[in-house]
Image (cartoon, rainbow, N blue to C red):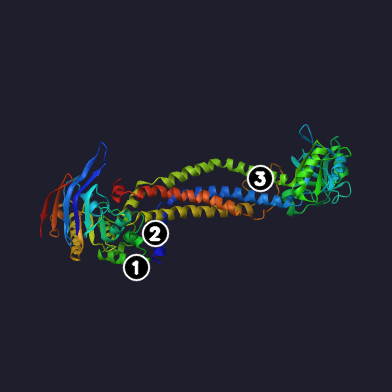
Amino acid sequence: MIEIKNIRKVFNAGKTNEFAAIDGVSLQVDSDRITVFKGPSGSGKTTLLSILGCMVRPTSGRIEVNGREITSLPEQFLAEIRRSGFGFIFQQYNLIRGMTALENVMIPSYPTGERRSSLKKRAVELLDLFNVSHKAGSRVEELSGGEAQRVTIARALMNNPRFVIADEPTAHLDTKLSREFMDIMLGLKTEGKTILIASHDPVVCDSIAVDRLVGMRDGRITTVDDRR
Amino acid sequence: MTFIQKQRNILDVALCSLLRRKGKNLSLVVAYVFVIFLLSSVMFITDALKREASFVLKDTPEMVVQRLVAGRHELVPTAYAKVIGKIKGVQSVSARLWGYYYDATNGANYTLIVHQDLITSPGSIMVGRGVARHLSAGENGTIPFKACDGSYLFLEIRSVLPSESELVSADLVLMSELDFRRLFQMPEGYATDLVLRVRNVRELSTIAAKVVQLLPDTRPVSRDEILRTYDAVFSWRSGLVIVIFAGALCAFLILAWDKATGLSAEEKREIGLLKAVGWETSDVLLMKFWEGMAVSLVSFLTGIILAYLHIFFTSASLFEPALKGWSVLYPDFRLTPFIDGQHAATLFFLTVVPYTAATIVPSWRTATMDPDSVMRS
């Protein structure tokens, strides 16, 4: 479970263009659920996901992951939490060009010091799970949008994280692929993963897989729709 | 074991990253190798020549006494030898006859030395291999020398000096005293300089002081001073070569600085991504360290090996004119391979370490930022 209390994130503090991307948000994200943050561009969805995923520190407020306060932890501990606890699916996929799909999937596990053979075995199994194992040796720039998306999901799951965070995951997908993505998320939820998604795509927001829909605007939570 | 595996994994990503930017890194390696090659070539040849010179000069007399007139080197009366020979501590004094001869026909300078032991009869000479090559002359050949009075002296080559000594004997002509004096119209009772052997080298400075006291128009030069002069000449010449190639060095420094310090937007995004998926700042820096190390170490070793081949196998074909002298009689010889470990280590620390550091610093700046901020920028 993740709990955030009175989170505020200010960019360009002290400058003329200072603005608060997140302005006093408190929320409890339950485990084994799919929570979707919905809102227009600039509403603070991505920033909130980054804060929840320990990718950025809030200007003020507290974050607790499974009861452990992490706001004041040094960077190396946050990196360890990101590596073992979170899997990220980015809007632009953020796969490293020039590397193969397999190498991209293995990247999060390299600092663990695990043997390469066992990393490779796990990465191939994940690619196989999402039906892209035949592209394991292909460079990522040779992949289609749907294939790149599935490679990104495989990478997010490489370290078997408790939480999966997806930022506008269907922005570059057609309706069919978007539905496939939500089916995959549903499958992960069934396996016990906690899913956090930022999206304003109706395919995502209206999906039956979603347990909670959080509306956002101007850095604040406007609505919370619990569907279960 | 985990630590080693982690290093291997990160090294793997680093090498993969280098290969992904083949064009950029290859151009950098080429420039890097060229600069290391030049610097180490200069270093190798200078050290090897200094060493050769010190070996050659090892058996030279402890002191040479010259006579000065108006600050210029002048012929010394052989009578001075008797005066110096009486100084306590002097073992022996002998007069030397030597000079330079310009062969206008062939455009070459020869060093002429009188050697009483090797050349016993007038009319014959011994020549260095450079002279023999230049004149296409061998044993029993005749070389005409134009004397000061305009007449010609035809001297027969008795033998050519061995190739082992070519570094110092390439332009050498050994002749009899009689021929030498006839050639330069040098009066009897005068020599070019005097050489001294002393019983105790620690008394050299005292003996030198006494020589100057007894014969105020003389200048004693000790062997150490000659060695220091050789050292300075070779260092100066190597400095000259470095100045010639300073442009290339500056171009490389600018290129290396630009390539190493400026992270592209793609590289920054990659660092942000690695941090986002759980890499620590130290992991990112380790990766960049291996990248910088791979480029600089490969370039350093390649440059050093090429320089070694260039100096010790092709006799420094690229810049021997600048380092060996201005004579047209270049010695044809192979230097004994010699590398000064301290100089090599200095070159290593002045090239590999700064480059590696230059690649790490900008990455460190990026890696210490929030991954989210880096990926958004």
Judged from this view, the residue extending furthest toward the top is B70
Residues marked 2 and 1, same chain: no
Q: In the rendered view of the protein, which quadrant contains the N terminus of chain B?
A: bottom left
Q: Is residue B312 left or right of residue A123?
A: right
Q: Relative to residue A170, is residue B33 drawn left or right?
A: right
Instruction: Count neighbours of disc 3 (C-alpha within 10 A) and say few if under 14, some if 14 to 19, many if 20 or more.
Output: many
> How many residues crowd mark 2 within 10 Å: few (<14), some (14–19), many (20+)?
many
The quadrant of the image that shows the C terminus of chain B is: top left
Q: Is residue B321 left or right of residue B176?
A: left
The residue at 62%/45% (across/down) is: B319
Residue B89 placement (x, y as % from top left): 82, 48
> Label for residue B234?
3
SS state under label 2: helix
Which circle marks residue B10 in the picture?
A: 2
- As drawn, the label of residue A118 is 1
| Secondary structure found at label 3 | helix
Q: Is residue A220 above or below residue A151?
A: above
Q: What residue type is disc 2 on? A: Ile
Q: What chain letter is assigned to the residue under label 1?
A: A
Q: Percent position (x, y) of residue A68?
A: 23, 59
Chain on which label 2 sits? B
Question: Residue flagged by tag 3: what amino acid is it?
Answer: Phe
Count of marks overlaid on the render? 3
The amino acid pointed to by label 1 is Ser
Which chain does the residue under circle 3 lie in? B
Q: Nearer the viewer, residue B113 or A99?
A: B113
Res A137 visible: no
Specify which label sits upstream in the sequence, 3 or 2.
2
